[in-house]
Image (cartoon, rainbow, N blue to C red):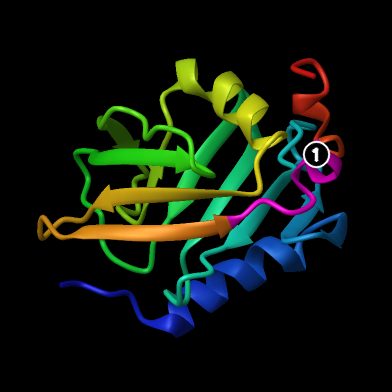
Amino acid sequence: MKKLPKILLLSLMFFSVAYADKQSQIGAFIVIERIDALTDVDTSGMWTPDTSGDDGSFLSWKCTENGLAVYVTSSYELGAKGSATTYRFDKLRASKTEIWSSATSGTAVFAPARLVYSMTAQATKSKGIVVRVTDVDAFSRTYQFDLTGFSKAISLLPCAKDIF
């Protein structure tokens, strides 16, 4: 098992917050409204921490130059080739397991673009989501995320306003 040092994760979180234009807490979410100073691209985002006790793991929605992205950041190394991922909102049926693409850091996986709208729509109606990701050592990591305040938080992301 490869676990990243907490100091590295805290540094990355601080970097994101330190350059934020506006930060607020809405329910379980931290919302960061930001426009890139060089490119004027909206890079706003929101995240909620894992509630099952794994410090450093988050579920995020973020504006990118390609639109809205949904991803899970882990305190464990997930690998560079993607990770088998399954999720379930509340007590609904779990999704089928799919390979989500990995971030270059190897510590985050991105939902396929075709799932972003449906996941976002379901999150507006749900209290929580459980996500299971397979890490680089083939261990299943199960994360639980509180979705309290999701609808209000997502409404602050300019890239999501076209979706809802």
Q: Give 73 or 35, whichever is nearer the viewer.
A: 73
Q: Is 75 positioned to the left or the right of 152 in the image?
A: left
User: Percent from the top left, x then y, of residue 69?
Assistant: 56, 32
Residue in the image at 36% along x and 81% along y: 5
147 vs 122: above or below: below
164 vs 99: above or below: above
Magenta stretch contains residue 150: yes
Circle 1 residue:
151
Going by the picture, which residue comes out furthest to the left? 137
Element carrying mark 1: helix
Going by the picture, which residue comes out furthest to the front? 91
Q: Residues within 10 Å of mark 1 (few under 14, many from 20)?
A: some
Task: Give the magenta-colored segment's residue range.
Answer: 146-154
User: Percent from the top left, x then y, of residue 86?
Assistant: 32, 39
Q: Is 69 positioned to the left or the right of 127 in the image?
A: left
140 vs 82: above or below: below
Residue in the image at 55% along x and 76% along y: 11
Q: Which quadrant does the C terminus fall into?
A: top right
